[in-house]
Image (cartoon, rainbow, N blue to C red):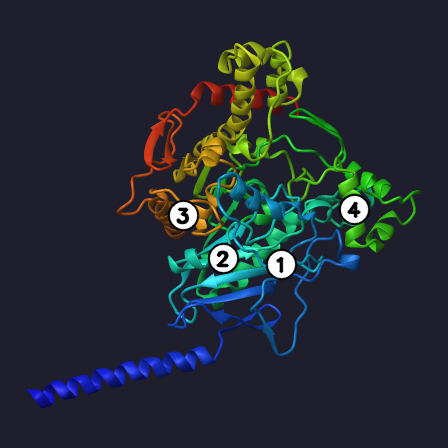
Amino acid sequence: MIRLAQAVRAILLSLILQGVNSAARAQSSPPRAHVDGGVVEGSYFDARSTGAVFKGIPFAAPPVGELRWKPPTSVPAWRGIRDAKRFPPICPQRLTSTEYYAGIAARVGGRPAAEEPLSTSEDCLYLSIWTSSFGSAHRRPVMVWIHGGGNNGGWGTQGTETGEFLARQGVVLVMIEYRVGAFGFIADPALTAESPHHASGNYGLLDQIAALRWVQRNIAAFGGDPSRVTAFGQSSGALDVTCLMTSPLARGLFQRAISESGVCTGPFAALKEPVTSFSEHPAAEESGRELARALGITGTSNVVARMRARSADEILAAMSSHPGIAHEVIVDGWVIPEQPDRVLAEGRQLRVPLVVGSNRDEYRTLAGAFPVPSMAAYPEQLLSALGSSAPLRAFVPRLLDAYPASDTVVAERKLFEVNNDGFGASARYVARAMTKAKQRNVFLYYFTHVVPTPGGRALGAFHTGEIPFVFGSEIGWPHGPFDLNLRNAISAYWVQFAARGNPNRRGLPEWPRYVPASDRYLELGDTIRVGRRLRQRQYDLQDDAQAALDARIR
């Protein structure tokens, strides 16, 4: 028996040493993958040599020089092994957005997380990948994160830190960069004329489409399943995800979608003609003319060439001094062929499983205040929150009934509500459009978690508040007793949805499919529970106003 025990111990020790040596050998050889353009080399984030991260992989050629304000083109090939261990520069932008999360941390009584210094460059069309199944034959679902920032700023790791937390739960996580602001969303008559598609603008959306195409071709090399790709985003990233659902160029590139606090409801500016509806939109091509004027470029000859000759800093300075220059998704006749509302109303959008929702107090971090100078001004302010006053004036009695106020203090609170309801009502609108299009796997949520400090309670469930719970990121906000459970639940719902097209799994509260008749949703807060008919009177009012606006452009 003694000899047997000694033999068993010797065998176990040998196996352990073999495992250690194997891991050491694997760790001494960084992970490599062959992708468009050549071989990239990343790094491991676990001792088993299956968790790997690749940072800064190019998915398109640098959009510089003659390629500025053009659709992304193929990645140039490189020789040898390309290092993929550092995050890429972020796309050019005014870096006021770097203060957003630090400002929230200060307001809720936390401490801002340390951030690496940021650099910007027009050479910014890169993506980063986290996988815990590198080298495995088993293909895992893929989640492609499209960051927010008003399509004017932001970057992949802002507020998310890394994709490691989600990767460890069983997905391949991809974060992409795309052109923003004037570089990503300017339209111009000369740009339209040089395009074989007779379109300009929406270059940021084209970058997202190019990244999704890259994922289809290359993600299997990282253990990902190209037939189970979830496009998910927050704020303008969420708007972009749902806009892609109406674009013929994005068909087949993703099989599920998650939209956090943003959807593609409009109407949007059109390329060549004004759109008078939700707001007064001049022809989108006017944005390019305004940028040229802001740059001091006069005359009509070689305008685009002269604009391309200007530095990125000069363009950013022009945008800063002329904040009214448009930089948004437009109806260009190609990427977005027609008003997305029309596509949604007629059920012609991409019919993929969808998670969509909003936060209870979105505007607490988006607007400092909604001052009401007098009660006589209140009806007009309510009306302007819905859009252009002329076509909606008949809604004033309903607005005053849905958002009653007896004095200016209450009226200011009600103006916050009507703006917040724009997020919630739009989310429900898209959920209903998807169910009308016969997509059964549609799930509506309402995020209500509040940071448990006096400053946190003042902010409520603010815009971006759900992001740390999705990504497991630590960005300096104080924790409450229910935070860990909420983080584990939200991330598990998201991962399960990416895997199955349905977020429900054993051990979590049931999340019912959205059905307009029952109007049920899942509240994601300190208590996770099913609710129904959330702010129904207010949301119905906003739906009717949206329909009235849409009717003017059809």
The residue lying toward the viewer, choosing from 28 and 430, is 28
Disc 2 crowd, CA 10 A, few/some/many (<14, 14-19, 20+):
many
Identify residue type, mark 4.
Answer: Ala
Q: Secondary structure at mark 4?
A: helix
Image position of 393 with respect to 360: above or below? above
C-alpha separation, residue under disc 4 versus residue under disc 2: 31 Å
First in sequence: mark 2 or mark 3? 2
Left or right, 403 with reference to 452: right
Q: Please name the amino acid that badge 3 sits on.
A: Trp
Q: Which residue is mark 3?
A: 494
- Circle nearer the viewer, 1 or 2: 1
Question: Foreground residue, 71 or 529?
Answer: 529
Count of labels in the image: 4
| Nearest to N terminus: mark 4 or mark 1 | 1
Q: Using the rendered image of the protein, determine whether residue 399 is visible from the camera's viewpoint.
A: yes
Which residue position is annotated with label 4? 317
Label 2 to label 3: alpha-carbon separation: 16 Å
Q: Are marks 1 and 3 in contact (CB under 8 Å)?
A: no
| Element under disc 1 | loop
Residue 434 image offset from top left, x and y in percent: 46, 35
Mark 1 = which residue? 117
Q: Are marks 4 and 1 in contact (CB under 8 Å)?
A: no
Name the residue located 40 percent from the left edge and 63 percent from the top edge. Answer: 139
Marked residue nearer the N-terminal end (1 or 2): 1
Name, please, the residue furthest toward the bottom: 3
Callout 4 environment at 10 Å: few (<14), some (14 to 19), or many (20+)? some
- CA distance for labels 3 and 4: 39 Å
Q: Which residue is mark 2?
A: 162
Residue closest to the eye, 131 or 301: 131
Q: Quadrant of the C terminus?
A: top right
